[in-house]
Every structure is written in C-alpha cells, then in structure tokens.
Image (cartoon, rainbow, N blue to C red):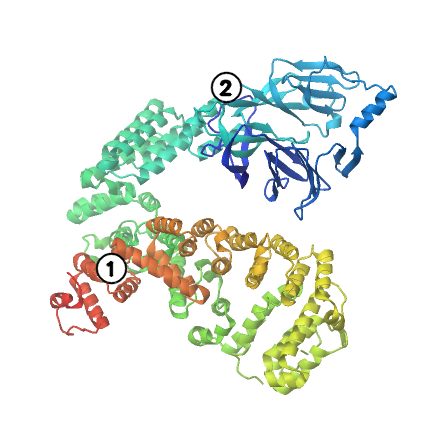
Amino acid sequence: MWNDIELLTNDDTGSGYLSVGSRKEHGTALYQVNLLVKISSEKASLNPKIQACNLSDGFIIVAEQSVILLDSTCRSLQLQLFFDTEVDVVGLCQEGKFLLVGERSGNLHLIHVTSKQTLLTNVRSCIYYMLLLTYSGLFCITNLQLLKIQQDSSKKGMTVKNLIDAEIIKGAKKFQLIDNLLFVLDTDNVLSLWDIYTLTPVWNWPCLHIEEFLLTTEADSPSSVTWQGITNLKLIALTATANKKMKNLMVYSLPTMEILYSLEVSSVSSLVQTGISTDTIYLLEGICKNDPKLSEDPVSVLVLRCLTEALPENRLSRLLHKHRFAEAERFAIQFGLDVEPVYKVKSNHILEKLALSSVDANEETEWQQLIDDAKENLHKIQDDEFVVNYCLKAQWITYETTQEMLNYAKTRLLKKEDKTLLIYSDGLKEVLRAHAKLTTFYGAFGPEKFRCWLTPVIPALWEAEVGRLRCQEFETSANFESRFDVKMLESLLNSISAPVCLQKLCPWFKNDVIPFIRRTVPEGQIILAKWLEQAARNLELTDKANWPENGLQLAELFFTVEKPDELGLASSWRWISLKDYQNTEEVCQLRTLVNNLRELIMLHRKYNCKLALSDFEKENTTSIVFRMFDKVLAPELIPSVLEKFIRVYMREHDLQEEELLLLYIEDLLKRCSSKSISKSTSLFETAWEAKAMAVIGCLSDTDKPSELFELQEDEALRRVQYLLLSRPIDYSSRMLFVFATSTTTTLGMHQLTFAHRTRALQCLFYLADKETIESLFKKPIEEVKSYLKCITFLASFESLNIPITYELFCNSPKEGMIKGLWKNHSHESMAVRLVTELCLEYKIYDLQLWNGFLQKLLGFNMIPYLRKVLKAISSIHSLWQVPYFSKAWQRVIQIPLLSAACPLSPDQLSDCCESLIAVLECPVSDDLDLIGIAKQYIQLELPAFALACLMLMPHSEKRHQQIKHFLDSCDPQFILKQLEEHMNTGQLAGFSHQIRSLILNNIINKKEFGILAKTKYFQMLKMHMMKTNNITELVHYLADDLSLDEASVLITEYSKHCGKPVPPDAAPCEILKVSPNLGLSL
C-alpha cells in the first residue's frame, strides 16, 4: 500500500539512491532535476502500474490501487484514497472540488475533495454511463444501452464507418491534437504525425521506440502552433533501452528530432500528463531494489521529479557547493565552461581541511594526502595571484612543507618575471618576505614550535624578535628598532585577524607591543588606537560569552600601559608621552569606547539592563531609563524593578524621577497607542496599557494643574486614566461611569464610539475598587466584566464599519453571527481576530471554522496573536483535531527564528524566548520538528535554547544521542551565560535549572573542570558537586592543576556543608589530611 508520503525539494546534486546525479546524462541542453514528492510502500511491487497528471486545480498521482491528490505546486497533501482494484482513470473538475476515479473493475467514484466524502459509487452493470469531465463541470449520460443501440442500428440498415483506416494507424494508444496536427502513438511504440483534415500522414519516426510522449511549446497558446510553426514544439518521450531495467527520458526539438537532452531513468517510470504550454517536465519514477534472483526489480519507492531547463553555470555552482569536484570537472569540460573555478574551490576546500589537521603521527597519512592534492591542484590553476596567496595563507602543518610551497610560489613567479626589470613584482616580494620570516622563525624556535607560526605568522615572528631584544645589548636591539616603521606596524596588526585568546594577547600588547610602539614609532599610536577600537567592538560578535568585559580589557590597554622607567628598558630615553597624541580623533574615539564599555558593564551588573553596544551608543541617560522599563516584560514587576535598579540609576545620574516617569508614559503612549488605533481592540493586546498603568502607580500624588480637557481632542478618553489620577476617586469614577454607559453617540463635537466606552471602563477598573464599581452599576462585578467584553467586541465591529447595537449583539445567536462575519470579512485581519475571540468567548468549536482561523492568522503574519490563540485553545482537546493545529504551532515557533539574524536585536531576542516558551506550551510537541528548531537556534547563536529543544524530544534514544553530540561540540560557559541572562525568570526558569544541571554533570563526567576554572561559573560548579556529595575529582584537579590552597578552600566549604567543619587556622596540607573523614579518597 502506497501510504507513506513525503513532500520535499532536493536538487540534482543530492546524495543517495533517490538522486539522479550518478546517472547518464547527455545533450546540448541542460535540465535542473528537483525531487518534489517521495511515496513509499511497506511491500515492494513488481512493475506497478503508475500514472500522474498535472491539472490547473491539482496534481493527481495513481499507484496501483492508491490515489493521491496534491495541490498544483505539490506543497500540500489534499487527499489520499485506496480502492479495491487498480485505478485506470482519474480527473478533477469544478476548480478541483470534485475528484472522479475509475477502477479496473468498472466501479466509478465521485468524491468531494473538501469534505473527503464519496458522493457516488457506480457499480458496473449491463447499462453503460458516459461521463464527460470538463472545466465547467461533470456531464453524465445515463442508461446508455450500447448493445440495444447496436441491435436497433443493424435492423435499420445503419452502418458504422471507421474514419481512420486500421491499416494506416494500428492500435493507437494515445493521441494529442494541436490545431490541425494529430500526434499518434500506436501499440508498436511508433509515433506519427497526421493532418487531421485529410487524415494523411505527415511524418513518422519508426526507428524510435517511444512508450510515452508529451508535447510542450514556447508559443503563447497551442492554437498558434501550425506546421510552419512546429519549430516551437518540443517532444518529450520515454524510450526503451537495451537494458530492460532502465529507460531514457528524451527531449527532442521538432521537426528535426534533434536530441536536446537525455536522462537515464528506471524502467518503472511514467511521464506526468500536463498542459502543452508548460515549461516544466514532470516524471513519476519507481526506485528499484536490485535483486539478481528476479528478472524484474521490485519497487518500494516512487518519486515525483520536475525538470526545468537550466543554465550549465548554475549546475556547476551546485556541484561545487556539494564538493563533488570530480563530477564538476567533467561537467565543466562537457559544457565548455571555465574549469579553473573548480580547481580554486577544491583548493580552498583543502585549505579548510588543513586548518583542522594536526601534526599528530596518527593523522600523518591524512594531511599528507591533503598536501599532495593541493600541489596537484595548484599546477592546474593559471591565476598566479591566487596561487601565491594560497601558498602564503595555507597552514602547511610542517616547516618542510611550508618551505617547499613558498619555494614553489617563488619559482613559479620567477619564471614569469620580466628579466629586463630591476624590480621584483609585489607578489614575488611578498613571497620572499614570507620566506625570510619563516627562516627567522625557524632559527628562533626550531621545528618543534612550528605550530606557533600558523596562528598567525607575524605575531609569532614579532614575539621571537622581542624575545631577542630582551636578551641582547642596547646596540643590537637598536638595530631592529631602527628598521621598524609604520608599515611594519600595520602588517603586524592586520595579521591578527582570527579570534585570539585575550589572556595571551593582552599581556603581550601591554608589556611589549605598546611600549615598543611608543618608544620606536610614536606616530603609530594613532593606528594602534584605531585597531584596538575595532578589535574591541568585534569581540561582541566573536566572543559573546565574555562580552563586554573582554572589550573593555582590550580597549583600555592603550591607557593603562606602564611608564618606561617601570619597565626598565634600555632605550627609555626615546619614550614619547601619550599626552602628545591624546587629543587625536582616533585616541578620543577609543577613550569614548572605554567609557561606554564601563557604563555598559555597570548597566548590566548593577542595574540588570543588558544592551548591545550599538544600541547603547544611540541612547542618553533618559532613554536608557526607558529601555530599562521596556525590558520588564511583566507589568507586576515594575515597582520592584524600579526600586532595585531604575531608581538607583536615576539618582546616581541626577534625573528627576516624576518627570521621567511621565515622559516614559508619554513615550509608551506614542509608540503603542497608534498601533491599537489602527487595529481591532483585542482582549489579548493590552500589555502596553498594563505597563503604563503600573508606571502610573509608581507616581506620587500631584497637584496635573491640568484640567480634565480628558473631551476636546480625539484621544481624550485614551488619556483620561492618566489625567484622572490627580482627582478624587469618587469624581473620577462617576466621570468614567458616564462615558462607559452613555447611550448617546456624540460627545460635544466628537463621535462617542464603543472604543471610547471600552477605554473608559478599562480606566474605571484600574482606578476604582470592586465595591465602587458595583455601587455605580448597581450590578455584581461579574456582570460589569461581561459588559466590558461585549463593548470590546462592539468596538471591533465598529472598526470594521459593521453597524450593530449593544442589544442586538446580546440577543443574536452567536454562531450564526460568527459564520456570517467569517463569510463576508475573512479577507480582513481585524475581522479574523474578532471572530477568533468571539469563538473563544462563546465556546464555538467548529473544526472547519477553526482550521480557517489558524490559516488566516498565519497568512496575515499575526504571529504573537496566533501564539496566544494557540495557547488558549490548547486546553480544548476537540480542537486538537483541527488539521492545521500542529502546523500552526510549528510555524508560530519557527517564523520568528527564520526572520531573526545575528546580532539579535532586543525585540528579536524576546521573540526567540517566546518561541521557546511556545515549544514548552505546545500540546502536540511530538509533531514538532524539534531538531530543525534547535538548528535554527544554533544559527542564531542561542545554544542554550537549542539544548532545551533537544531535551524535549519524545524519543529517549534519539534524544540521548542528539544531546550527547551537542554537548561534545558546544561551549559550556556560553550556555551557562545564556541561561543566566535569558532563561532565569518566568516560564523558562524551571527548565533553565535542568539545563544547568545537564551541563555541569557533563563537565563532571568528562572531568573537564578547567573549562570553568577562573570563571564566575566555577563557584556554581563547586556548589553543584557539593550538593551531590561528589567533590573528590574536583579536589584532585585543584590540588594537581591549580593550587593546594584552592583545594583546601573547597574541602573547607564542603566540611561546613557536611556539618564537620575543619579548624579555621588549619594549614592546606592539614586540611587535605582530614578529607577521608568527609568521605573523600585522595
């Protein structure tokens, strides 16, 4: 049974038996082959009957007794049916709403596609039915008694004439008519061309054994094709081969029958019937399992491929992208393309592999083969500049190989140098310079430290020279200093391109590089300051785990270097003071960066506000306060965050609290209320108002000289809650009650809308207590809340220009109202939101309606709202049966991730957090592609989020395998940092604890304690191990690799934890002796 269907897209450079990359392919044209659909059967079939047709309303695939209906683009499955006997004929009509299926048994079925109901099944009898399937519908001629008609015709002397002589066309099995031209394929697999008016043969091709054929044309329509215009036609044919297990898909140009393209396909293949004006060829192909015991190979997989004419350059590019270099080289030669890019890409690929290799004897065979491949490749490349750069940049593993490749580059360039010129070319100069530096390095360090040459060349050479300077007398060192200039400095700095360990770089800069520059080339300080500024900024992307502390550490080096008398250098008399260059633009920018980074660190550590550097540089003290408020997601946390962090910041920067809070409310109103005005009022989307109300609650009483002129402007009622705060509560409550319940439609010169009433009542709920509201309305609070919901819905009707009164809304049947609204307004995003909330409020759970809601919300890209809707309906188990339910969850999770890019903005980071929360909340998480979601988080540099997804995988064995692979390749410190910054509050906090334990246990199991040593997370590791009473290995590590003091401190802390404290004045060695008493085996 053909019941396992995969919808996918692969190109021809894929791998595995489903690809066509290894098959024979010929012709002057080139077709791109894409894999659209894969259909599998549990049981293999010998030579299964397959067919398919591509119609404007859908794509139908028939495999024996199975019928599969896809949409016209093969992106979604519409219907899958199974019948008792093989299916011979299928068709669609009425815009794809009805499917007609004819079985070999004679049974005929008419199926309604949308509801998947069989409307008619006609069992065969002696009475025939003629069914005509047309674009305008299905026509049925019933009670067609052919036997009786034949008998009556014979009695009356009527004769049936054969319009086409059987001797001329024998057993025709397919016709295709184009204007006056009739293409005929007979049972002998011979294709011929006829004039339809005279029924005379025009052409035939008896030498070709064609099993199936199609015609395509580049003309605007088939009717424009005539015999004179047959050159617009292409013939696509499946032809037999000597190998019965294979066929050829052939593309011919007419009328010359020149072969444009040929592709070897399996013997179980069928051309998909399509319209003549299409420029795409579809092929349904059975993938055979080779079995020497059988004369025919069984088929267990069907694939649907599409072939579109493509440029050879595009195919070559894909082959190179897949690193299929041998095939790419043959392809380039076959199509006359420039083959040099193949060699260049292959060389760069070898370069990448060399960078990952080591000089370990176990890998010698591997990297030696890479070097041999590189040499062979370079010989084929004509571009000298590429070859020279390659020889200079490649990591050649050993000194001997490096010297050999530099000699190769030198020899190659010398052969092409102009002997009449006295000056070498720049390329040759660079090679000679590198060769000299290599020799210098070799003399300084010898071959055993050759790996230092690789990362990078010039700093290693510089270190060698500085080492010599410290060991030599002043006269010798002065010789080197006299040769050092600004150009050499630029070369030195530019060579430090890859991420470098700051623990090594900073002491080198502080103790050697910067003092040397100030002493030798003081003008180079400008270049150095500019480089330090950019390098510090780059660390935000290249070393996120330690940002921004690492950036400050690098940037402030320029200002913290010791003076020459403290360094004790012999040439201190040449020292140039920093003061001479402190007012240059570059130094001023570096000083500003240092100040900004210090403030950024303070913001994070002291005020719990993390900003990107680029965002911080755009802010001032006022806007930073705004950003602090913005980062508080839960309005109820506003007072505590204000007290702990924001108020402290405002006081330290002499900011007026009351004024600033009011400015923030105004800023929030401007940013958010405009969105609400343009959209329907939603029960879900009042978060910004709740935050504004929370900030208002932090204001002290004012005396808002402002009058209540709350009704002289259009947004008066939106601002009324702010203006009424300074008024007595009984006055404000009565005023708001009047607006909320007014039956008039105008207020002064302005329209009084349901939106105004809704806002007024929301303000009243915020300002007044339960008793006050009940006394005003003379109703229980629950009825007042119900009234608020009703006028909120009426405000939405109002924004859609649908006139409806409060009474009509309350008395109308809600299901009928909803369906009418959906029918007439489903094309409007506001209406979709409204019907969704009405269904939620009045518990209307029609599956078809909800399927439409979810699709529309996704179509309008209303992702945050859709996420809230999905969460709301997750408790309604009947709605899990909605076909779009699982897909909506998947898309809600993935769309924010797909639209984000590194570096993440605060909004994008918040969206990524929301997506992870959605993964936790999803009731059908087994249906989610959690590995795919994890990969997207990794691309966004959020490995902690990716690990969370892997931990939620349903299958334990696969989950364990994926997590183990992930932990082997991740940076534990970076993950712990993300847990601390992004997952320590709210719904993610509990899950964060599980991830933290997983990371720490992995470090413990691998005994890789050094990963967290000297980081702030080392204390976390110690506490975790003490809680599990398992610190023996950690004590070993501290005693052996760090210091006895550190080990004794840990034992002291553990002894307190166990209730067996050691004496406070005990020496480290004595503390180690008491460890057996604590259960430690040292």
Quick check: 26 left or right of 999? right
User: For this rendering, which residue is in front, 566 or 220?
Assistant: 220
990 vs 418: above or below: below
Q: Position of residue 833 (x, y in %)?
A: 65, 61
Q: Position of residue 112 (x, y in %)?
A: 69, 45
243 vs 52: above or below: above
**Label at residue 395:** none
Quick check: 690 left or right of 591? right
Give the quarter of the figure containing the C terminus. Answer: bottom left
At mark 2, the secondary structure is loop
Quick check: 861 left or right of 226? left
Earlier residue among tags 1 and 2:
2
Q: Position of residue 939 (x, y in %)?
A: 44, 49
Please say whether residue 565 is visible from this viewpoint. no
User: For this rendering, which residue is in front, 499 or 935?
Assistant: 935
Residues at circles 1 and 2 in contact by the CB criterion of under 8 Å: no
Image point 44% across, 63% down: which residue?
Answer: 988
Type of the residue with mark 2: Asn
Image point 61% across, 22% down: which residue?
Answer: 211
Type of the residue with mark 1: Lys
Q: Position of residue 965 (x, y in %)?
A: 35, 48
Give the quarter of the figure containing the N terminus. Answer: top right
Disc 2: which residue: 243
Categorize mark 2 by other alpha carbons within 10 Å: few (<14), some (14-19), many (20+): few
Image point 22% across, 55% down: which residue?
Answer: 573
Quick check: 930 left or right of 183? left
262 vs 1052: above or below: above
User: For this rendering, which residue is in front, 959 or 688?
Assistant: 959
Please say whether residue 950 is visible from this viewpoint. yes
Categorize mark 1 by other alpha carbons within 10 Å: few (<14), some (14-19), many (20+): some
Disc 1: which residue: 563
